[in-house]
């Protein structure tokens, strides 16, 4: 397989935790260069699906390719192509911003003589050049998130995967995180795959979105296509939002919002950066 073609192609992906099916036959294609949003409430299966794409979970059933590489058969090639910002804290509070990014540069095999420059560029790209030599423990929640973004960017990934990048941040910090993501994407042409349950962010920043519910994609398209389609079906002159589209495809499931475990995990994630 060459590394041309779509950034991500999932066919019939299934993943279960014991008897509980988290991802239930996911078919999904992310085109090279697009910003793609995987949306859904807590427990929809978003994190499980992207952990399969990143090779952190196996692919027990179905097929997942990243730029043509089968993630099950060619794990190292896939890892070299992607940067991943997980929901969990990945920055070390006892190191400076620069030391945190340098650590990722070493782990991701950035050539030694390029490391210092690449670390500096990654910090600059997320607006942390001036704060780079402060301890990460002194950073605000938004700065920690941007530091984690720099960690993922230092290896110059072709595919950046972000799991709830703005959860727990105030509106100004959320905008700042997104503006830095979009600026790096515009400069590098990298593909971005992001999970979020903030429909407004998806509407504003994503080229296409997949609405996921109970392990399956229930709707797929550009935010405008999805809202236009619902407007046409309603035919009552109202202007639906992406959230209305989600309520339409997921029904009452959206309000139920996953199990207790899912809510607790999300709260933990939010408080660790707050
Ligand atoms: N380690 C685990 N053990 C058992 N079940 C799990 C585990 N991780 C996730 N699940 C279950 O799998 C389903 C999908 O979870 P997943 O984390 O993929 O959803 P999500 O859409 O990313 O939600 P969130 O926004 O809360 O992260 C949920 O029902 C969840 O309870």
Image (spheres, helix red, strand yellow):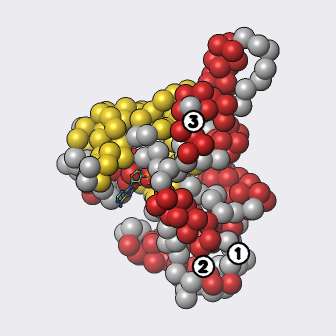
Residue corresponding to mark 3: 252
Q: How many marks?
A: 3
Indicate which disc, 1 or 2, sits on the residue closer to the N terminus: 2
Mark-to-mark CA distance, 1 and 3 = 36 Å
- Dot 2 or dot 3: first in sequence order is 2
Whether residue 151 sits left or right of residue 123 in the image: it is left
Q: Marks 2 and 3: which is nearer the front?
A: 3
Picture coordinates of residue 40 (x, y %)?
54, 43
Q: Nearer the viewer, mark 1 or mark 3?
A: 3
- Vertical relation: 196 (above or below) 101: above
| Residue visible at 26% across and 43% down in the picture | 70
* Residue at disc 3, CB closer than 8 Å to ligand 1: no
Of 206 and 132, which appears nearest the observer? 206
- In the picture, the quarter occupied by the C terminus is bottom right
Using the rendered view, name the quadrant where residue 221 is placed. top right
Q: Which residue is drawn at the image coordinates 69% and 67% (left, top)?
A: 142
**Residue 97 — which label?**
2
Displayed quadrant of residue 139: bottom right
Residues at marks 1 and 2, CA–CA distance in whole angstroms: 12 Å
For residue 90, side relative to residue 125 (left or right): left
Residue sitting at x 36%, y 47%: 22
Q: Residue at x 22, y 46 (%)?
A: 60
Query: Gap in Å between the C-alphas at discs 2 and 3?
Result: 43 Å
Q: Do tag 1 and tag 2 residues touch (Cβ < 8 Å)?
A: no
Q: Which mark is residue 140?
A: 1
């Amino acid at each position: 397989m060459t590394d041309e073609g779509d950034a991500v192609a999932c066919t019939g992906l299934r993943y279960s935790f014991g008897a509980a099916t988290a991802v239930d036959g996911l078919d999904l294609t992310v085109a090279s260069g697009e910003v793609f949003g995987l949306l859904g409430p807590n427990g929809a299966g978003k994190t499980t699906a992207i952990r399969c794409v990143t090779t952190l979970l196996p692919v027990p059933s179905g097929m997942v390719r990243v730029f043509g590489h089968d993630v099950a058969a060619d794990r190292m090639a896939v890892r070299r192509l992607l940067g991943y910002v997980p929901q969990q804290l990945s920055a070390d509070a006892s190191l400076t911003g620069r030391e945190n990014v340098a650590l990722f540069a070493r782990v991701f095999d950035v050539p030694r003589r390029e490391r210092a420059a690449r670390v500096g560029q990654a910090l600059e790209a997320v607006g942390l050049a001036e704060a780079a030599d402060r301890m990460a423990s002194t950073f605000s929640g938004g700065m920690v998130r941007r530091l984690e973004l720099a960690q993922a960017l230092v290896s110059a990934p072709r595919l950046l995967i972000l799991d709830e990048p703005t959860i727990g941040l105030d509106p100004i910090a959320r905008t700042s995180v997104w503006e830095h993501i979009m600026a790096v994407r515009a400069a590098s042409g990298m593909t971005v795959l992001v999970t979020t349950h903030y429909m407004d962010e998806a509407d504003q920043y994503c080229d296409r979105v997949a609405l996921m519910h109970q392990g399956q994609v229930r709707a797929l398209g550009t935010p405008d296509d999805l809202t236009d389609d619902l407007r046409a079906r309603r035919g009552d002159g109202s202007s639906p939002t992406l959230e209305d589209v989600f309520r339409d495809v997921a029904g009452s499931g959206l309000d139920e919002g996953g199990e207790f475990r899912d809510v607790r995990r999300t709260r933990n994630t939010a408080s660790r950066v707050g």
